[in-house]
Structure formats: C-alpha cells, structure tokens
Amino acid sequence: MNEKLELDKRKAFILATVVYEYIATAEPVGSLTLTQKYNLGVSSATIRNEMAELEASGYLVQPHTSAGRIPSDAGYRTYVDRLMQPESLTKDDSRRIRDEFREASRELADVIEQTTRLLSGLSGNLAIAIAPSRDMHAFKHVQLIWLSARTGLIVVVTSGGVAAQRVIEWTADVVADDLTRLSNALNSRFGGRVMEEIGPGDVDAVCAELGASTEIRDAVRLAFAAARQPDEPEIAASGAQNLLDQPEFHDLRKLRAILRIVEEQRTLYDLIADELNVEAAAEAAPHVRIGHELRADELSECSVVTVPYRFGDRGLGVLAILGPRRMPYGRLIALASGTARSLGEHLNDVEIR
Amino acid sequence: MNEKLELDKRKAFILATVVYEYIATAEPVGSLTLTQKYNLGVSSATIRNEMAELEASGYLVQPHTSAGRIPSDAGYRTYVDRLMQPESLTKDDSRRIRDEFREASRELADVIEQTTRLLSGLSGNLAIAIAPSRDMHAFKHVQLIWLSARTGLIVVVTSGGVAAQRVIEWTADVVADDLTRLSNALNSRFGGRVMEEIGPGDVDAVCAELGASTEIRDAVRLAFAAARQPDEPEIAASGAQNLLDQPEFHDLRKLRAILRIVEEQRTLYDLIADELNVEAAAEAAPHVRIGHELRADELSECSVVTVPYRFGDRGLGVLAILGPRRMPYGRLIALASGTARSLGEHLNDVEIR
DNA sequence: GCTTGGCACTCCCTTGTGTCGACTGCTAGC
DNA sequence: GCTAGCAGTCGACACAAGGGAGTGCCAAGC
C-alpha cells in the first residue's frame, strides 16, 4: 500500500462508483462496466489508468489479474466518510418502525429483543442491541415480600422498570413486619437517588439501623447489585440467517466463525460495547467500523454500524447492525439511527416517573 | 416400498451395522466395507444379497447405482426401536451435568437457557428447551405495590418463582392502602390453590368485594393471565452453529430452512410442543422422531430426540435435541434423559414451598 | 439350498484439457 | 491528457477420459 494521494474529483467519482456498484452486485467491477453503466465522459482505457492508480494508493484491490476491482477497507472508509451521500428513512421504513414501537412491550428485555427483530428484518442483516446502562436510572422502589417464614422475595424498581427480583431462602424464621419496616426505611432513604449513588455501604447502614439479620442484609445487597449490574450482559441479537443470503458467507468457515461470535454473548458484547464508552459523552452519532477496524480476524470481511440510543438522560444503550463489508451503508445508517431514535422515545414513554 | 418382512437375525445385524457405520462415517456403506470392518462370517456377495432384500423391504436406500446403502426413515426407526443397545451416561458427561446444575440459576428463564447451552455443548447438536407448563404451579403470593399515585407494580409468585410482574399506569389516583388490602384479600382467597384453578371470575369476585376500580381489576386479571400463560412461549435454543459441522447441512438451502425454524420461536415451539400433550399422562420417556415423522419438509433430513421433564408434580417441560438423522441416538437419548432428570431435580430444589 | 468367487456393468468423482470471456496494462497515435 | 487497439493473463465452464467403489447376477461348490 502506497501513499494515499489526495483524490481528485474524477478519482473520487470512480471510487464511489466502484464501491456503489460492488455493493449492488457483489461482482468485481471492471472499467468497461463503469463506462457502460455510468456516464463518465471518458473511455474505459482512461478509467483503467485511474483505477490502477487507485489500486496503487490502496483504495482498490484486484482479486486476481483478470478480474475487476473491489474496494479495500480504505476504499470503503473513504466512501463512507466522504463520498457517500447520506440517506434518510424511506416513508415505508419510517412507518414500519413507528408501527412496531406502537405495540412494543414495556418490559425492557422484551423491547430489546423486539428491536433486534425489527432491525434485522428491515436491514436484512444481523441486528444487535445492548440494553441501556442502568447506572443513571432513578431509584423508585424496593419491596421485601414475605412468602413464608423461610422464604421471601425482593423486588427493586427503577425508572427503567423492575431491575431486579429474586426469591430468597433464609435459614432462620423471618417476620413479615420486619420486612415491611425495612422496605419502608430503604425507600425513604433512597428515594430520589440515582442507582449509581447507592452502594453496598448505604444498604448496610439502613439494615444496621433496623437491626436486620446478616442474611437479610446480604439479600438486599445482592438485589441492589443486580439492579445496577446484571450477571450477564443484557444483549440481544437476531437475523443471523440473513447472512446466509450474502455470497461472502457461503464459505462455511467464515459463517461458523460469525455464528460462534453471535452465540457467545460475551464476545458479542465486547464487540459492540466500546461504543458505550467512546460515545458516552459525544453526541449520539452513527459509527461505522469496517473490516480490520473491528480488530477480529473472523470479522475481517464484515462491517458494523453502531448507533447509541439514549434513555432520557438515564442511560445509554447501543444498536448495531453486522453484515458483510459490502453493505448499503447509507440505508443501514438511516435505519439504525431511526430505530434508535424511536427506541429512545419508546423507552421514555414507558419510563416510570 | 414393499412389504416389511420380519428381519431374521442376520438381516437385523446387517441393518444395525449399516446404520451404525453410516452414523459414524456419513458415507454410504457398501458390502465390502461391512465384511472388512465387522466380523460377519460370510462373504461380501452374501451381504449384497441381504442388503438387496433390505432395500426391497424399505429399510435401506441407495443414493445411486454404484454407491453403498444408507438407512431409510424406516431403517433408522427399526434401529432405534429394536436394534440399538441403550447407552447410559459416561462418567464424564454425568459429572459435567452435575457440575452445571450445581451452579445453575434459580431463575426459570435463565435455567432453561443454561440447560440448552449445556445440552448443545455435550451433544454437539442443536438443543431446545420448553419451560415447564405453569398450570400446575401452586399459587404462592400476589403483591400490588404502590409506586406513585398513578403507577404501581403487580407481582405474582408461584411455586415456580416470579411468574408475572408488570408495571401499571392508572388514570385515576390510587391509594397505597387499597393496594395492600387487595393484596391481602387475594392472598387469603387464593392461598393453597393451583394456578389453573384461578380464573378471571375469581379475581373479579375479590376485586368486587373490596370495591376496587375496574382499572385495578383489569391489571390484576392481566397479571394472573400472564402468570398462567405468558405472551410468548417460553422456549430456548442454542448450538445452531454445531449443525454447520454436519456434512448434510453443507447445503445452504437446508441450513437456511433450519435456521429460520430456530429463529422463529413459534414454529420451534410447535415442533416440540406436541410432546407436552402426548406424554403428559405417560411416563417421562425419551421419544425419537425421524425424518418425515417430523411432518415438516425442511426437516426431512433431521431427527429430534425429546424428553419430557417433570417439575415435581407441578408441570411438565420438554428438552429436545435436533440434528441430522445420522445422529448417535443412544448417546443423545442418554444425554437428554440425564439432563432432564438433573433439570427436574434442580427445579425441585429451587421450588418455593 | 445357501454361499461364494468372478465378472460385467453402472455411475459418481476427479482430473485434465481446451475454449471462452472478462479484464488488464501497454503502446502508439491523436 | 485521452483513446483505440492489442496482446496477455487468468478464472469459469464445459467436456471427455479414467479410476474406483459398489452392485447384480451367474455358475460352481459345499
């Protein structure tokens, strides 16, 4: 790969057209195709010269001598950053998104999953969603419920809904009144706070005041910990079978590598989650990572579009679309952004105030 | 397909060996292979005659003239029903199952998913689990929780854990005391009952006695309905990428058809759920369906092993393994049965009494 | 009458060959 | 700087030949 010479207008147009055409056809693009299908005003020989220079500069590559050119990572990157024209949602997509969220669940986990289904259906790729971070949720309510002398239930509610619930078994008998008093004390102490402000120490303090047993204290601690940070990352993915339609995944090894990533939620989470930190402060803008930019060999022929979405000022989640590098970036960015916006609005609507 | 003549001992052995060998190698089995790898005491010519008769009777088929034989659905069926020797769990599998459940979650949805992960890992196929039916769960507790004048939370607890929870918004102000009184009334009325005995009429009666608003009544009704019968079937599947390793799924069309079935939970549920009814009364025995017995064209080259599992006397779920017809039935039946047993025990342990 | 060795036959799969077509790079001329 | 023309490269495809695995059948043997 040589020096990246600044692209003159014609080179830029040729590069953009090659990317566009390759995305559409999945076939290497030759000089003749370009002159025939697009009005370039010059002959194919000229295009050949230009394409040779674009290849020397690292924007295009040639699969083999007698084939046309396909974009390199750098070619896609330039296309996405500078050449492509932004698209907006079509009326139809817009309507489908609106309709979907009109009937969406109030339950966070369900919403997340439903959203990936919607987005994978619209985009024809694999869609992923990470639930909004919970640290900024407002504490709403905690209730310890007496089920029997040796069992109870604890429920923590935040502005995002039921954030933790668990059944507890105790080794010593517990009285219902004690649980009620503790619930009341916790509620009055924590009311108005944001979840990230409530640490184990705060729980301990309240429990100590009321003389709660260590068993009860531990249960409350665990519930609050789970409310802030669930055991497993809250993530959903769907539409893996869409990838089968893409010619680049007809190679079984690549397909297997990707399916493995999707089934292992942890790696999937890691793949997307850096967006949570990077973009936390910045404006919620779509972000595209192409091929090797994903820093995963299995994904070197993939691209990912990520869009953070806001849950009021109460947390940040991420939507993502994963597909072949040869993806319609403009449309997918519009889809992801539009869906993220509607998702944010929906979450706002179902927020507990 | 002709008359199914009763198999004499030698035919039975040959059929069993062909199935066994084909399961192991995925290659059509010829007469020479049989005489060389297995001690049959007769020449390959004799085997050829026998195999021709087995084919005439419908137990074997020949992919093409110059190939060996592979089992037909009927061949697999006979193998599974009468020829195969039952296997028991290996020490190693046994240990892995035990270890897994030792650390398993108490949360039903998590357990189900964890189980499919375990079973797909052990079996190298696609594993599916349907959560136990809830009708026989014992009602334990219902709690209406006041969050604010216009919002509340309702939680229904059964012997299986938290069966329903939902946040409710009201259009008229609600007083905390009313919710508490209603909770108490519902609890004392329904205590000791089984969920299937609690209908909307019963809820209405209690609400009417306490003069609860129609809004509150509807919320309670919905919560009880959801506790008995969730909106979506509770089902989990994992290990789809295992199927990629099987040569029969290297054909992309077949693969896509199967992935589609797996991603559509509804069809997956329908595929497995008849076991719930059929086996409800019978003893919890493994059941194998082979090829066309599945009554789905896309699955004509697949088999499914299903094993019901009991949650005490309180409900019935199903574990299933889906894979190519050419699956190691003995091992998979042992794995599914063993996992189902451990799952039942685990659920019993975490049951709320 | 069952079994067996032998043999002709079938058909898939692999390999090799040749043709075709797409595309390139280069050169000479405008 | 652009273009037409041309030779060269290489993959895709079709086709034929050969090898190999396996069969069915038959005649001979125990």
Image: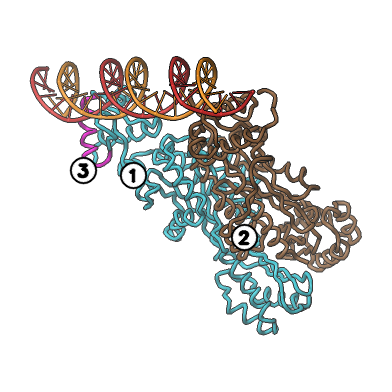
Chain colours: A cyan, B brown, C red, D orange
Same chain? Circles 1 and 2: yes
Q: Which amino acid lies under the numbered mark 1 shown in the image of this protein?
A: Arg
Q: Which amino acid lies under the numbered mark 3 shown in the image of this protein?
A: Leu
* Label number found at residue A5: 3
Can you see residue A124? no
Q: Is mark 1 on a helix, strand or loop?
A: helix
**Magenta-colored span:** A44-60
Q: Which comes sooner in the sequence, label 3 or label 1?
A: 3
Q: Which chain carries label 2?
A: A
- Work out whether residue A213 or residue A160 is closer to the camera in this orientation and state it: A213
Q: Which amino acid lies under the numbered mark 2 shown in the image of this protein?
A: Gly
- The crowd level at tag 2 (other Cα within 10 Å; few <14, some 14-19, many 20+) is many
* Label number found at residue A160: 2
Residue A86, position as x, y percentages in the image? 41, 40
- Work out whether residue A243 or residue A23 is closer to the camera in this orientation and state it: A243
Residue for badge 1: A77
Quarter where residue A52 is shown: top left
Q: Main secondary structure of the magenta part?
A: helix
Q: Which quadrant of the rendered structure holds the C terminus of chain B?
A: bottom right
